[in-house]
Amino acid sequence: KVLLVDDYAPIGDLFRQLLEKQQDMRVVGEAGDAEDAVNKIKDLVPDVVLMDLSLPGSSALEATHAIRVGSPGTRVIWLEAVADDVYKSEATKAGAAGCIAKVCPGTELLNVIRSTYAQDRNEEITKLARKPD
């Protein structure tokens, strides 16, 4: 389950079209700003949030923190015009799973979403395996 967060509707539409073609992904909602995204998390409970880094209102950093606190199982992937090492570092510090360029090939975006989801599930399995009886 994916929540799309972008204030530019044509970009959101492109991402939605790409994701809806995937049998293992479903867009559960869209938000146009960070505050709306945080408010929708409780009801939608997405596995992954694709969030534009340049949103009006609250910063992506603040929204990422709020999402991670309110829904610890939800992973956030930042979308930026150019995903350089500075943004990737900031994403990690904020609790995001990572940062990817908006202009990346669709297959790359899908791979990032899938690996983020798989990594999260693998971490849960590892935690369960380590639990004492």
Image (cartoon, rainbow, N blue to C red):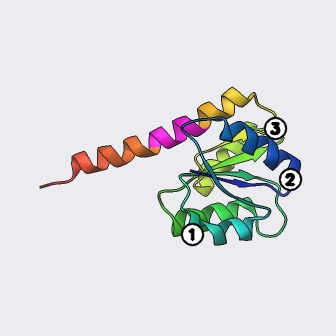
The location of residue 118, given as percent across then percent down, is 46, 39
Residue at (65, 72) in percent of width and height:
39
Disc marking residue 82 = 3
The residue pinned by badge 2 equals 9
The location of residue 4, given as percent across then percent down, is 70, 53
The residue pinned by badge 1 equals 43
**Label 1 to label 3, Cα distance in Å?**
31 Å
**Vertical side of 49 occupied by 105: above or below:** above
Q: Which is in the foreground here, disc 1 or disc 3?
A: 1
Residue at (56, 70) in percent of width and height:
42
Badge 3 amino acid: Val
> Magenta stretch?
113-119
> Nearer the N terminus, badge 2 or badge 3?
2
- Point out the image quarter for the C terminus: bottom left
Number of marks drawn = 3
Determine the secondary structure under disc 1.
helix
Disc marking residue 22 = none
> Nearer the N terminus, badge 1 or badge 2?
2
Q: Residues within 10 Å of mark 1 (few under 14, many from 20)?
A: few
